Amino acid sequence: MPLITLTTDFGSSDSYVAQMKGVILAVNPNARIVDVTHSIPPQDVARAAVVIESFIPAFPAGTLHVAVIDPGVGSSRRLLAAEAAGQRFLAPDNGVLAPVFNRWPPGQIRELQNDRFWRNPVSSTFHGRDILAPVAAHWSLDVDPTEFGPTIELDSLVPLHVPRPHRVGSALVGRVEYADSFGNLITNIAASDLDDGPVEISIAGRIIGRLWHCYSDQPVGAWLALIGSFGRLEIAVNGGSAARMLNVMPGAEVRVEPGERGT
């Protein structure tokens, strides 16, 4: 029973996701479909890229991941089939898979060109349903990906221009990537970016004097910083929403400096 995940910016108020599932199940009724999220902000390729990289280690080998965040749908942009990290990927060539490929170099990448595996006719505005979904279903039935189209070189893919943390004097300067559904602010600062020893974290005038282990290490309503489940620095409020209380947007600066352990 092959496993197929869906990550999109379609939301839940329309039938787009259901149509994709229907196409998959029409080709392979035994497919198991996992909804990762359909709440990616519209056309936010960078947010989707972070989310996709974060969940790959949780899935078994052979899982097929379909990402439809596709502001270039209908244009000349390419659609990709790729294998990396022992798993399979279908997505537009717009940078959404860049973090995955940076972390797990792909074994092969192909451009979807063989319309024998597509629906007919193909809508110019819904390639998720008419190309990616049926290709996913056929791939889940062990169609050889060499049949989908020609090989693409990794260095020809569209890059994703996401700022990395950088040093300014003794400070590591990063940024907020997004707020999760709890209002925790997820940054682009990975645990591996941090030096050993005590630190002081600041954001939007708020200073947090140390890293904590978990949310409940602080009283309800108190601020804290910690390394979250994504392996990244998070700014949080125990039992509250840091995003709402600070009123910051993605891109807001976060600074980590050497400091004494405090509260």
Image (cartoon, rainbow, N blue to C red):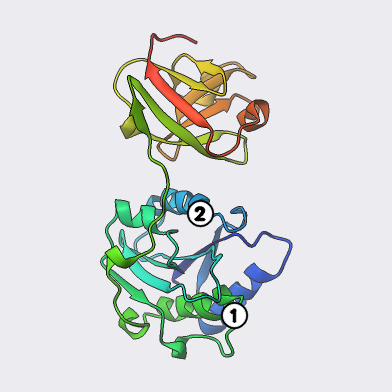
Q: Give the numbered dot on residue 216.
A: none
Secondary structure, mark 1, is: loop
Residue at point 52%, 28% (across, down): 235
Q: Is residue 258 left or right of residue 107?
A: right
C-alpha span from label 2 to label 1: 22 Å
Instruction: Residue at 38%, 40% (x, y): give it.
Output: 164
Question: Callout 2, which amino acid?
Answer: Ala
For label 1, the crowd category at 10 Å Cα-Cα, with few meaning under 14, some 14 to 19 and many 20 or more, is: few
The percent position of residue 172, horizontal first and vertical second, equals 37, 26
User: Where on the picture, by quarter, is residue 150?
Assistant: bottom left
Apparent side of residue 146 relative to residue 207 in the rendered image (left or right): left
Q: Is residue 219 above or below residue 58?
A: above
Q: Earlier in the sequence, mark 2 or mark 1?
A: 2
Q: Which residue is mark 1?
A: 124
From this viewpoint, is residue 22 visible?
yes
Residue named by callout 2: 48
